[in-house]
Amino acid sequence: MKDSAVLLIDCPDRKGLVARVSTMLYERGANILHADQHQDHELGLFFMRVEWALADGGTSSQGFDLEAFKAEFSPLARELGMRWKLTLGDRRPRMALFCSQYLHCMADLLHRWRSGELHCEIPVIVSNHRAVENLAAFYGIPFEYIPVTAATRAEAERRQLEVLARHEIELVVLARYMQILSPSFVASYPAAIINVHHSFLPAFTGAKPYQAAHARGVKLIGATSHYVTEILDDGPIIEQDVARISHRDQVEDLVERGRDLERIVLSRAVRWHLDRRILCYGNKTVVFD
């Protein structure tokens, strides 16, 4: 990642927002690398992502005083009703991976992480099955086996949350983790739990979407990555993709083709979150270029 800073903003829309933010950065000597914005005209909302270099024109991560910038920016943010977050571009968020018995998404994410595509730390892998234990060992990542039954669900989640707290986890990725999280678990990580669902939501929610799609005779199947909320398979959608099928395809064919889609949409969602490219509002997301 670049020696840079990233600022995310959302606020009521009004004239001059881009100019005021960019002018303040310019006056402090920032070299803007990338800026993107979006307006929701129906709701009157404004969203912006701006990234600037910290090592340009003689400045550096030490020379560009981020704390001084925060102090100067805060009054402007209050005046304009902004919610905002400022982070260093080279900061590596701490991410935990959850899965059950299907390992294709897990294996894909670990490969991308090892190759440097996902800019994060992965301190722990959690599963209610032991199928992923060897994969975790291959990548040198601690593995936590926490079985879940209807009778032990609350205790299992308590243990999971202890593990996440101990490893100071900031993002939880459900890489085909086939358990429903409780509202209290979800509330512990707002807009910080990413799931992949093996259908093109909102169609075919639940545990067997490929079977439901085949029974309905659809001509397209899809996969969806989304943030997890209290309502099953209803959180803000981050990414989706589809593949065309025909009457000749059986459920097994849909599953095989769908797994490629699952890998793609989950890895994109995780990468965009790690790169600070997503803002949530209502039950929607803005994903910046």
Image: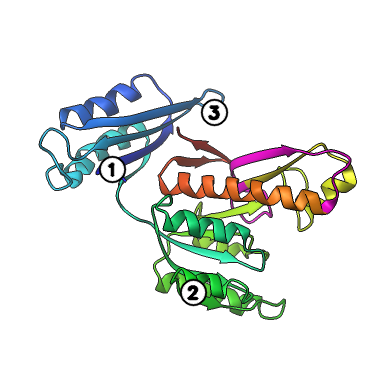
Segment tinted magenta in the rendering: 225-251
Up-down: is 110 above or below 248? below
Q: Is residue 105 left or right of residue 86?
A: right
Could you say which disc has been placed on residue 137 in the image? 2
Q: Position of residue 74 (x, y in %)?
A: 26, 40
Q: Position of residue 256 (x, y in %)?
A: 73, 52
Up-down: is 272 above or below 22? below
- Dividing the picture into quarters, in which one does residue 76 lie? top left
Q: Decide if residue 27 is in sight here.
A: yes
Count every numbered label the image shows and give the total: 3
Q: Is residue 183 left or right of residue 188?
A: right
Residue for point 33% across, 33% down: 50
Give the residue pinned by disc 1. Answer: 2
Mark 3 and mark 1: span between their CA atoms? 34 Å
Give the residue pinned by disc 3. Answer: 43
User: Which comes sooner in the sequence, label 1 or label 2?
Assistant: 1
Disc 1 element? loop
Q: Which of marks 3 and 1 is in front?
A: 1
Q: Which of marks 1 and 2 is in front?
A: 2
Up-down: is 282 above or below 209? above
**Residue contact at pointers 3 and 1, CB within 8 angstroms:** no
Residue for point 37% across, 39% down: 8
Residue 253 is inside the magenta segment: no
